[in-house]
Image (cartoon, rainbow, N blue to C red):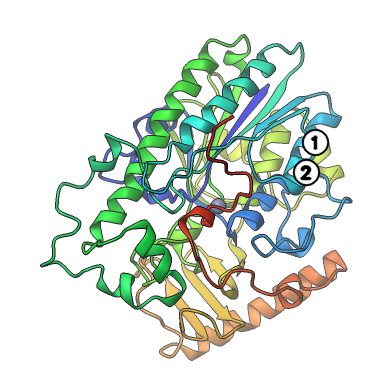
């Protein structure tokens, strides 16, 4: 079968209708979910973008692929085969509309970079720029006499949120510069690493609800852009035998932990991302799968769907195929516990289980959060009540479990511990124009 992998950067699951959000941000994606299979507890264990996509594209964790930072000097080892490389080797036509470059370009017959205008006073139309590249990718796929894999990478919910009309006012009806409001005061004035950036992006903003509504507007804009992709797909010869996968590399912190409008912190806001599968014949009917699943499971799932389960085994992918879970409507996930990490704005790691989140800080970081955090995800899903001091025995058991897991993975991989070897790469955002990690952004779209 053909595979269309759609990643929407910075998309948290809980802001989509199909994951229970009460605003109409995602009618197109909801429709795919209503006719496909949705994974309710899908986790991005290694954030942000570079670790996230490397985990998706290799089916391996950071102990194997060693990409823990954002934009760091470390390159992915040539010994590790990426998903498009494996598919290409097995006769697939492989194509992408993406702008990450580096090892993310490996294995593609066609790698189409997109660009968008960046005048900060204007809305950004990133989704339409990606679509222009995506249509060329899909046209090339449609002209093949062999199965194809296409990867489309959208960026709309990434900061700065500058959605075009009419999306910009869709979820906000107040006066964002109302001088009697001061809910944005702390964000705009007491957050040195982002202060200049926010002043440039949102000059004069007093209401913190405004950027939150702009985040939702970006999702709605991206969702509308996807309608054109789904229409295009329906007109293609292989549409009836195409697996659609919708996911994200990480979510976003809005105002939950005073880490305003970016994706750092190992909280559910950043880690709980969507995963939706759709195939007209095999994955339909609006099933929902409970239980924890993770980024590492995407590559083995795609290879399994392509009839290449043996290639997963040959390449020793750490994740597991989700096909049997999707078909059986099972309530189990693929694992009870997962190692989580971040080494971009802060250096942290921990464990997430179905009930608990344990986070350990390895560096005196930007936000001055406590050195240890422990949350009961069922009693406190917003992760507001740190149990680390109240439950010292439970904390110690998680510290022990983490140490055991690290030792086990280092033994299995025979390698070194990447988060101890690499430094954080992000300390300051100076300008809206460089906020999106892309050195290819030009004024004029090509
Ligand atoms: Zn990202």
Badge 2: few (under 14), some or many (20 or more) residues near its Cα, within 10 Å? Answer: many
Q: Quadrant of the C terminus?
A: top right
Q: Residue at x 21, y 62 (%)?
A: 207
Q: Nearer the viewer, residue 392 or 168?
A: 168
Per the image, label 2 sits on a secondary structure element best described as loop
- State the image quarter where residue 239 is shown: top right
Residue 253 position in % (x across, y down): 41, 62
Q: Nearer the viewer, residue 83 or 8?
A: 8
Residue 138 position in % (x across, y down): 62, 20
Q: Residue at x 54, y 76 (%)?
A: 359
Residue 398 appears in the picture as rendered = yes
**C-alpha gap between disc 1 and disc 2:** 7 Å
Residue 34 appears in the picture as rendered = no
Where does label 1 land, which residue?
107
294 shown above or below 416: above
Q: Residue at x 58, y 59 (%)?
A: 48
141 shown above or below 387: above
Where does label 2 land, which residue?
82
Between disc 1 and disc 2, the foreground one is: 1
């Amino acid at each position: 079968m053909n595979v269309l992998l759609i990643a929407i950067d910075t998309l948290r699951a809980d802001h989509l209708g199909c994951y229970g959000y009460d605003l109409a941000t995602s009618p197109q994606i909801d429709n795919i979910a209503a006719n496909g299979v949705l994974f309710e507890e899908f986790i991005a264990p290694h954030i942000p973008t570079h670790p996230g996509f490397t985990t998706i594209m290799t089916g391996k964790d950071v102990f194997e692929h060693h990409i823990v930072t954002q934009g760091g000097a470390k390159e992915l080892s040539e010994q590790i085969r990426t998903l498009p490389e494996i598919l290409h080797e097995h006769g697939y036509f492989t194509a992408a509309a993406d702008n990450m470059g580096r090892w993310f370009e490996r294995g593609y017959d066609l790698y189409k970079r997109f660009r968008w205008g960046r005048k900060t006073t204007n809305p950004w139309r990133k989704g339409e720029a990606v679509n222009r590249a995506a249509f060329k990718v899909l046209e090339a796929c449609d002209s093949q006499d062999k199965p194809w894999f296409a990867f489309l990478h959208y960026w709309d919910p990434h900061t700065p949120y500058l959605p075009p009309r009419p999306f910009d006012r869709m979820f906000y009806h107040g006066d964002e510069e109302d001088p009697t409001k001061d809910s944005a005061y702390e964000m705009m004035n007491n957050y040195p690493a982002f202060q200049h950036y926010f002043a440039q992006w949102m000059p004069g903003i007093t209401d913190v609800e405004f950027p939150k509504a702009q985040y939702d507007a970006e999702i709605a804009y991206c969702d509308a852009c996807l309608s054109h992709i789904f229409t295009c797909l329906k007109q293609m010869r292989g549409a009836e035998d195409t697996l659609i996968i919708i996911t994200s590399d990480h979510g976003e912190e809005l105002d939950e932990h005073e880490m305003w409008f970016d994706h750092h912190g190992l909280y559910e806001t950043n880690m709980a991302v969507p995963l939706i599968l759709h195939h007209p014949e095999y994955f339909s009917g609006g099933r929902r799968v409970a239980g924890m699943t993770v980024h590492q499971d995407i590559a083995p799932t795609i290879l399994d769907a392509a009839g290449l389960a043996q290639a997963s085994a040959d390449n020793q992918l750490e994740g597991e195929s989700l096909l049997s879970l999707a078909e059986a409507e099972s309530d189990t996930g693929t694992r009870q516990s997962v190692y989580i990490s971040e080494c971009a704005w802060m250096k942290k790691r921990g464990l997430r289980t179905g009930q608990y989140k344990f986070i350990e800080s390895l560096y005196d970081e930007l936000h001055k959060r406590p050195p240890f955090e422990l949350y009961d995800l069922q009693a406190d899903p917003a992760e507001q009540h740190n149990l680390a001091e109240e439950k010292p025995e439970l904390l110690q058991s998680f510290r022990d479990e983490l140490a055991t897991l690290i030792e086990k993975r280092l033994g299995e991989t025979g390698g070194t511990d990447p988060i101890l070897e690499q430094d954080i790469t992000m300390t300051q955002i100076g300008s809206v124009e460089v906020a999106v990690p892309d050195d290819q952004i030009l004024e004029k779209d090509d």
